[in-house]
Image (tube, rainbow, N blue to C red):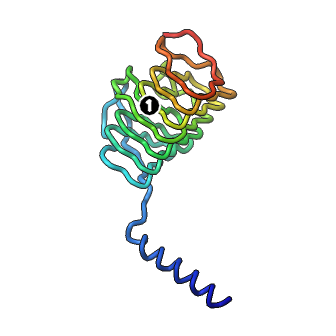
Amino acid sequence: MKKLARIHIGLLGLALLGFGGQALATTVCDTGPLASPPISGAALSGTVVGGVVVNAGATCLINGANVSGGVRVNPGGALFVCASTINGGVTSNGAMEVVFGAEELNCGGDTVNGIIKISNNGPGIFGPQPSIGIERSILNGGVRLSNNQGLIAVSQNTIAGGLACSNNVGDLIDEGEPSIITGKVSCKFVDSE
């Protein structure tokens, strides 16, 4: 039994040694305050390995990036994603604002491989604009929206994996340009431009 335990410890040690120099660290993103739309300012771009986290009080602009490891937005953070690819999905809980590919912000569409879960989002930081905007993007993994307070725009996307809504303050708007969705849809849309 002791011999078997030593073998396991030895294998664990080799694994840690092999990966020790290549550990994937999460990138903490705070690109600073953004100017009013259109979006401008510093951005996280290029190849990002190990994922991205946006903490309370931080605003993160991801523009022209290829992110592996997903994105997490913590309560009080704000995320804007333009012309980027995210592998690993997006999870946001209690964010001020979460926006993907918004045409109104001069922001190119995105590709997200993995589920997008946005819950408990606030009313937004740019006034009457939606506090959640998911536009002009390819989303492979579905979208789940729950307990959000502000306006939610979902338009011009290709969504594989369904679109689910629960307990949001209002229905979604598609800005006159609906998304193509495969999978179950439990969201309602209202007419709004």
- Name the residue located 68 percent from the left edge and 88 percent from the top edge: 1
**Where's residue 43, x and y in %?**
32, 40
Whether 69 is drawn above or below 9: the answer is: above
Task: Tell me where residue 162 sits by quadrant.
Answer: top right
- Name the residue located 52 percent from the left edge and 31 percent from the top edge: 160
Whether 162 is drawn above or below 174: the answer is: below
What is the crowding at mark 1: few (fewer than 14 residues within 10 Å), some, or many (at least 20)? Answer: many
Depth check: give the residue in front, 172 or 160.
160
Give the amino acid at mark 1.
Answer: Ile
Farthest-out residue, bottom = 2
Q: Is residue 1 left or right of residue 48?
A: right
Whether 166 is drawn above or below 173: the answer is: below
User: SS at mark 1?
Assistant: strand
**Where's residue 69, x and y in %?**
46, 51
**Where's residue 66, x and y in %?**
36, 44
Task: Tell me where residue 24 sits by quadrant.
Answer: bottom left
**Where's residue 142, x and y in %?**
55, 34
Q: Which residue is mark 1?
A: 138
Depth check: give the residue in front, 98 or 16.
16
